[in-house]
Image (cartoon, grey):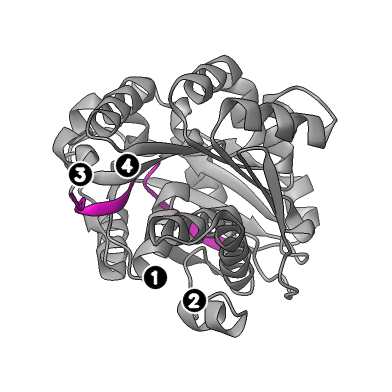
Amino acid sequence: MTKKYQVVGIGNAMVDVLAPCEDSFLAENGIDKGIMQLTDKARGVELYGLIGPAKEISGGSAANTIAGIAHLGGKTAYVGKVKDDQLGEIFAHDLRAQGADYETPLAPKDHEAETGRCIVLVSPDGERSMNTYLGVTEFLGPDDIDEAQCADADWIYLEGYRFDGPTSVAAFDKAIAACKGAGGRVSVTLSDPFCVDRHRDAFRALIKDHIDLLFCNRAEMLSMYETDDFDAALAQAASEVEIVACTDGADGAHVLSGGQRWHAPAMPVQIVDATGAGDLFAGAFLWALTNGHDLETCGKMGCVAASEVISHIGARPEADLHALFKKQGLL
């Protein structure tokens, strides 16, 4: 029986506030370059006041992935919490405009937290340093999970950043049970090496018990398996998960399954803003997988989509990905 959705994503619903900056600005304000740091509301407001002109775009890692799948014409839905406020309206509008279903109940106007936002400081080399105020998305819980929606999905896609929420694991457990109980499959992205450090045991248990497809990058893979040996880490992951898809920056991506390993080359491109590269890799990979493409092609399409999104500001595709896939002989 055909499911209503190819992929349902669950993650932190955020609005990205993208601003260019010099490396000196990062140093002056105590910001570690190239990673995601959690901030409180006061710090988020302070940084917002310090940055120059900025661009506000709906973001959130899994939401970017779902938007990418929707851009490709996939049938998708997203679960993530925003408030009934201005940024919440921006988030919901942008995601629905891409063609994804978004029905998560809004936090009420009188909620003490606000819609989450991520101040993304983009250095001249395209590297991004993220300062994240989770806001109401931190409170996503089991009550926000629509079991019927998860059961009606070929795949669910879980965002590793959600492990920072107090009731997130319970929400994931409910979604996994609903999806797998109806014959669906489960994927997860590790999101960030520091996120892995905070929740390694929980990630390891989730991966071994429930995950069919693991998305990560080199740094996250090494952090997960606490080794400096990339090939050994890949092999260990492949022994625990049916499909492993690991990105490796300018070296493209590695896909492992069933004792086989494929390499997908990166597309040469001028990096303008690295935000969303992994998100769009996962989106194109899942779209390709749910449309019957082989794993090597899935990896190659992922690299094409990643190269498109880093060629401009913002973590959502702007060019026609189908046309780019055809240009590379993938469609």
Q: In what element is the residue under mark 2?
A: helix
Q: Which residue is mark 4?
A: 114
**Relative image position of residue 327 (x, y in whole percent):** 59, 84
Q: Is residue 74 left or right of residue 234?
A: left
The mark found on residue 72 in the picture is: 1
Name above or below for residue 151 compared with residue 248: above
The mark found on residue 152 in the picture is: 3
Q: Is residue 101 left or right of residue 276?
A: left
Question: Does the CB distance between marks 1 and 3 fall below 8 Å?
Answer: no
Count residues near mark 2 (Cα–Cα under 10 Å), then give few for <14, some for 14-19, many for 20+. Answer: some
**Relative image position of residue 276 (x, y in whole percent):** 55, 58
Give, as a three-letter code, the residue at label 1.
Answer: Leu
Give, as a three-letter code, the residue at label 2.
Answer: Leu
Nearer mark to the viewer, of 4 and 1: 1
Q: Which residue is mark 2?
A: 321
Which comes before the other along the chain, label 2 or label 1?
Answer: 1
Q: Residue at x 52, y 53 (%)?
A: 282
Q: Is residue 274 left or right of residue 33?
A: left
Q: CA distance from mark 2 to mark 1?
A: 7 Å
